[in-house]
Amino acid sequence: MADNGNPYRPIKTSVLEVIPETPTIKTLRLKPDEPISFVPGQFIELTVPGVGEAPFTPSSHYSVKDELKVSVMRVGKVTEKIHALEPGDTVGLRGPFGSAYPLDTFVGKEILVVGGGCGFAPLRSLMYALFDRSAEFKKLLFRGGCRNPGELLYRGEIAEWGKRSDLDLVLTVDNGDSEWQGPVGVVTTILDNLPMNCREGVAIVCGPPVMMKFATKKLLELGFAEDHIFLSMEKNMSCGLGKCGHCRLGEYYCCKDGPVFPYSSIKGFGNIWE
Amino acid sequence: MQYIAEGNSVELLRRISGTYEVYAPRKNARGYSLERWNSSAAPITMGGARMSEPLKAFFFQPRQLVAENFSPNIPPLSGKPRCIVGVKACDLAGLEFLDRVFNAPEDRDPFYARVREQTLIIAADCTAALDTCFCLALGIDPFPKKNFDIALSPVNGGYLVETGSEKGRDIVTSHSNLFTEPDEAVLSKREEQRARVKRDAASRIDECGVPSVTSSEQWIARHYESELWKEEAKPCVECGACNTICPTCHCFLLYDQMQGGQLARYRTWDSCLYKDFARVAGGGNPRHVLWMRLRNRFEKKFDYAPKVLGQTGCTGCGRCVAACPGKIDIRNVLKRLATHG
Ligand code: SF4
Ligand code: SF4
Ligand code: FES
């Protein structure tokens, strides 16, 4: 929590740039009046003055403190207004909230990152952190999927990732087009025959709920341990303070105890995928 | 312990009202309600049972401005601090619950904390139980034991006085001429009276068969998929009255508007029975069916709260029983949770 006395007030923030990514996703480059530092896994609340707040996970590098980027999919009232923002507009930011990916516990292990659709956005800041420390991990794999090539987020940047020697990258789309040369099918179809020892490895999953559900099922079948599968849970986060009650998941508040949870700690609760 | 005669107690309130805005219970057609008190007002009802409304609105307003523009300042409090008189044991427990949510030492809500700190709580014994009272099932006796500044037990036309905080002790010490030492007879009279009210409260519980809720931890897990939720939720019209009237319900909504060209953020009471309470922006809703939301209300109070906050989220006040237009009776649900399936 930003310790500014009033936990509900947003920090005044300028929109520096609006980058169209896909037909439904735009990335905002933001400069808050006071620096906000986050670690991968945490989220912030973005305010459009007079309209409301919505939670997002920054997609930029965690070490850049004076600016941050968020990628926003247009799905509702607040995101509609976010898409209408232009450089020079004023917004607000609150946070960061929640817990981080436990990167230190990944040292010496093989790591699989599975992303789907808009889940690429929060994963980008995680990937930056993993790249920075890649020598400490045994192996790094990224498996991503989205509906069609046009919806692939950060396409140019991810193409560059494909050239990295410290990353094994495979992307798939549900429906290909004339240019698409990669595999076609949902993300679970590219999880077979992973070049890693799943029983010893760590998996991180982020994406739409249905994708997370089936990816988790698949990872369990592949032999990943329940406490080595880390899920980024999307709940209706609002206050970020563990008080408004909106984001409860079993014995946890997603905004404080999550949003990243090992599967083992939440599997017993009802309706986790909805 | 001290004793204060009826006349002196009015004098004490008169003196307190120099510093505090005093609210005291008054009997009306609906039961007991808190009203602004002044020394010329009609006599207050110190005993009786709980007030119709819980105390939470004093500390956690139904609608409160929590941020203006981008200012880190907290809008200042206006007026005198409040003194609330005649608070009963169930509502003291409700306050303790809200303290756990909004006033945990490492994680205070500044809006709640500052009002809580400056408010003076004068509690009182219940002298009768209402039909809907089931405090005993929650392990709460119908007389104040903690969470008060001063507690009064009506005996022999005056009150036995206990203090529960530095603030309370200061008040009693600085007006010591109004108090006397109680004699043995008064003390034993109080015990007799408390035992009688406790029997009265126990008989209400026996009448409707509410089980003891002090060991409810497995109830929800055991009945998670039970038909009972669907059956119980049938008459619910999603009005949220049960949440509004509940002393422990604390969920809120943040909503923003423009006011004079500036951002104004309000915090308002919310209800977990409303359809969109847990809905995410992408459209997913973990509790899209009403009975799931009713189950959630019980899960939060009787499973989450004892496990995580260390206190059950129900005080047995019975207000939701009286408030529900669908006549959903929490006592009945608890009975089913304890016995059914
Ligand atoms: S759930 Fe009902 S009986 Fe229990 S504290 Fe809330 S209003 Fe009172
Ligand atoms: S008071 Fe009754 S009808 Fe209204 S939301 Fe609560 S349970 Fe449903
Ligand atoms: S967002 Fe309010 S409790 Fe988690």
Image: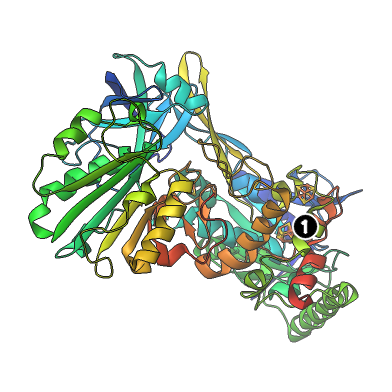
Across and down, in percent, residue B225 comes to 68, 65
Rendering quarter of residue B69:
top left
Name the residue: 20% across, 28% down.
A156
Give the left or right position of residue B115, taking residue A41 as reference: right
Give the left or right position of residue B9, taking residue A189 as reference: right
Can you identify the residue that label 1 sits on?
Answer: B230
Q: Determine if residue B33 is in view.
A: yes
- In the foreground, B110 or A38: A38
Name the residue: 63% across, 49% down.
B287
Across and down, in percent, residue A162 comes to 16, 40
SS at mark 1 in the image: helix
- Count all numbered tags in the image, as a single digit: 1
Give the left or right position of residue B74, taking residue B283 as reference: left
- In the foreground, B195 or A256: A256
Compared with B332, A10 (above or below) is above
Name the residue: 83% across, 56% down.
B328
The scheme the figure's colours follow is rainbow
Across and down, in percent, residue A70 comes to 31, 32
Compared with B338, B295 (above or below) is above
Q: Within 10 angstroms of label 1, few (less than 14), some, or many (20 or more) residues?
A: some
Compared with B206, B280 (above or below) is above
The answer for which chain carries disc 1 is B
- In the foreground, B117 or B239: B239
Q: Determine if residue A1 is in view.
A: no
Badge 1 amino acid: Lys
Rendering quarter of residue B47:
bottom right
Rendering quarter of residue B127:
bottom right
Name the residue: 48% across, 50% down.
B113
